[in-house]
Amino acid sequence: MAQRTTKAEAAETTTATDVASAYEPGNEADFERLYQTSYGRILGTLTAMLGDRAAAEDCCQDAFERAYKKWSAWQPIAPAEAWVHRIAINAAVSYRRKMKLREVGEVIRRMGRPEGPPDPQDQIERRDLAEALAKLPPKQAAAIVLRHYHGYTNRAIAQALGIPERTVASRLAIAKQRLRGMLSQSYGIQLDDEKPRLAIAD
């Protein structure tokens, strides 16, 4: 007889794109678990979009506060993390529009990169990539980060951004083309759809 898997055990293997039924609307413990498991990924997305860690933290916290207020009314037709991601991305878009952000603050840190001693050239490349991402329209930057840093599928990206799924592929293609154009003078850029990562190749 197969061993029964408890809800708590199943939750340990739940990822951003898993079934929405892993969480129960209005359940306080489930919302706390959602916060603990998804905060880092959502913060990473907003940091990449805004180029400013402090602003990203503010938007991320605001997004979770808004999500908490709507938690009882949340409909589990999409992954809970994608739902919060959408709220957070909208908050970041509003922030960028209001502040007319033009400069990048903090370099994107450790997104899909191996641990190890800091390398000066690597830090330069990360800075340049962060600057290039911040110059993209907010939802194009978010689509790139969701795919290549977090491994989101087109469907999950569509749910997070609030756009039709058929739009995601074209938005990713346009964003990649713009990134290559901005970075081609200094680096070759590797954007592999088959792997959830974004890296600059020498």
Image: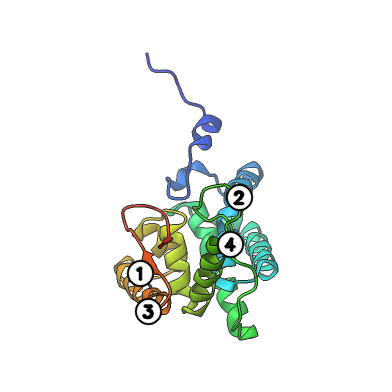
Identify the residue position indicated by label 3 in the image. Answer: 181
Task: Determine the residue positioned at 67% across, 71% down.
Answer: 55
Identify the residue position indicated by label 1 in the image. Answer: 172
Amino acid on which disc 4 is placed: Pro
Label number found at residue 117: 2
Task: Determine the residue positioned at 46% across, 57% down.
Answer: 149
Q: Earlier in the sequence, mark 1 or mark 3?
A: 1
Amino acid on which disc 2 is placed: Pro
Q: CA distance from mark 4 to mark 2?
A: 10 Å
Could you tell me which secondary element the residue under label 4 belongs to?
helix
Residue 27 horizontal/vertical position (percent): 62, 45
Q: Pointer 4: residues within 10 angstroms few (<14), some, or many (20+)? A: few
Q: CA distance from mark 1 to mark 3?
A: 14 Å
Residue 14 horizontal/vertical position (percent): 48, 41
Q: Are marks 4 and 2 in contact (CB under 8 Å)?
A: no
Q: Nearer the viewer, mark 2 or mark 3?
A: 2
Q: Nearer the viewer, mark 4 or mark 1?
A: 4
Amino acid on which disc 3 is placed: Gly
Q: Are marks 2 and 3 in contact (CB under 8 Å)?
A: no
Q: Is residue 57 visible?
A: yes
Query: Left or right: where does residue 158 sit relative to residue 105?
Result: left
Nearest to the observer: residue 182 or residue 124: 124
